[in-house]
Amino acid sequence: MSAFPTIKFQNGVKMPIIGLGTWQSTDDDVRRAVEVAIAEAHYPLIDTAEGYQNEEIIYNVLHKLIEEGKIKRDGIFITTKLWTNNLNPDRSLCAARECLRKLKLEKVDLLLCHMPAAYDVTGTEPERGVTVEDVWRGMEAIYEAGLARAIGVSNWSVEQIERVMKTAKVPIHNVQNELHLHWPQHELAEACKKHGISITSYGSLGSPGRVDFTLPNGQKLDWAEAPCALNEPKVKELAEKYKKSPAQVLL
Ligand SMILES: NC(=O)c1ccc[n+]([C@@H]2O[C@H](COP(=O)([O-])OP(=O)(O)OC[C@H]3O[C@@H](n4cnc5c(N)ncnc54)[C@H](OP(=O)(O)O)[C@@H]3O)[C@@H](O)[C@H]2O)c1
């Protein structure tokens, strides 16, 4: 692993504190961005997801860089996420195996369940009988099978995290949630601190690109209006004072 600062999960696995997000990138952009981020800017972590539909491109870049001797597999921390159609514990272990087989990887460093909701195989109908405790059981089976060095959740509420922690055999190692100036998530931070769970924030700059987001199937999402954190006068004032960019102040 690189010299970037890390945090340590409860199971001893260390995660770099900064990484490259890959949501919404086109195939060409993500290919180039991952190559430059890793080989030239020495980014230590790549964040992807089944739902981003770019995992194969990213892992092809990684395999190429490993073959060229530019990085070692353990020099890069890979976070990915299981999508809702693979969260039913009857299917999640097989789905994780299939996902790794396709990507020619033995294991990922951190596997998150992307949402607190299990859907049917087609991803269209919620599987109403499947609880968050059930979903976590499936994640534990993946961890125990050695397919992920650490496991966690994304977009889960404090209530859902508390419920799972009551019955978990393997604790949640990491929570990845939206967290930024306009939604600092104090309650989540308190709950995670109590359980020794680390937090990854996404949308740290306020996710300005989300309003133009179009799903891979062409559907344009209708986002609510939100103030842009990068343009907040106080952020700009601090940026000037400390000779940093507004984005650096927000991070
Ligand atoms: N777990 C989840 O459900 C979930 C959800 C959303 C995101 N994520 C993860 O978090 C990552 C980041 O999320 P995000 O893109 O929504 O939020 P973000 O990091 O808040 O926003 C990124 C946006 O900020 C702009 N930007 C980047 N650096 C900047 C700078 N120095 N100054 C001004 N603008 C800058 C980028 O513009 P350009 O396009 O011009 O670079 C991009 O549109 C995603 O790629 C994904 O990996 C996870």
Image (cartoon, rainbow, N blue to C red):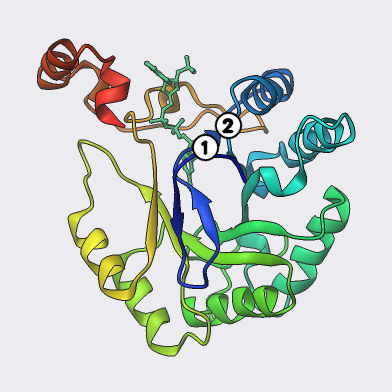
Residue 43's label in the rendered image is 2
Q: Is mark 1 within 8 Å of ligand 1?
A: yes
Q: Which residue occupies the extreme front position in the image?
A: 3
- Front residue of 17/25: it is 17
Q: Based on the displayed image, in which of its 4 quarters is residue 89 positioned? A: bottom right
Q: Residue at x 79, y 56 (%)?
A: 99
Left or right: 115 in relation to 122: left
Badge 2 amino acid: Tyr
Left or right: 31 in relation to 214: right
Residue 141 drawn at (x, y percent): 67, 80
Q: Which quadrant: the C terminus?
A: top left
Q: Is residue 27 visible?
A: yes
Left or right: 25 in relation to 31: left
Query: What separation in Å lies between label 2 and label 1 (alpha carbons)?
Result: 6 Å
Q: Disc 1 designates what residue?
A: 19
Q: Residue at x 64, y 57 (%)?
A: 109
Residue 234 drawn at (x, y percent): 10, 21
Badge 1 amino acid: Gly
Q: Is residue 123 visible?
A: no
Residue 107 drawn at (x, y percent): 75, 60
Residue 207 drawn at (x, y percent): 38, 29
Q: Residue at x 34, y 35 (%)?
A: 204
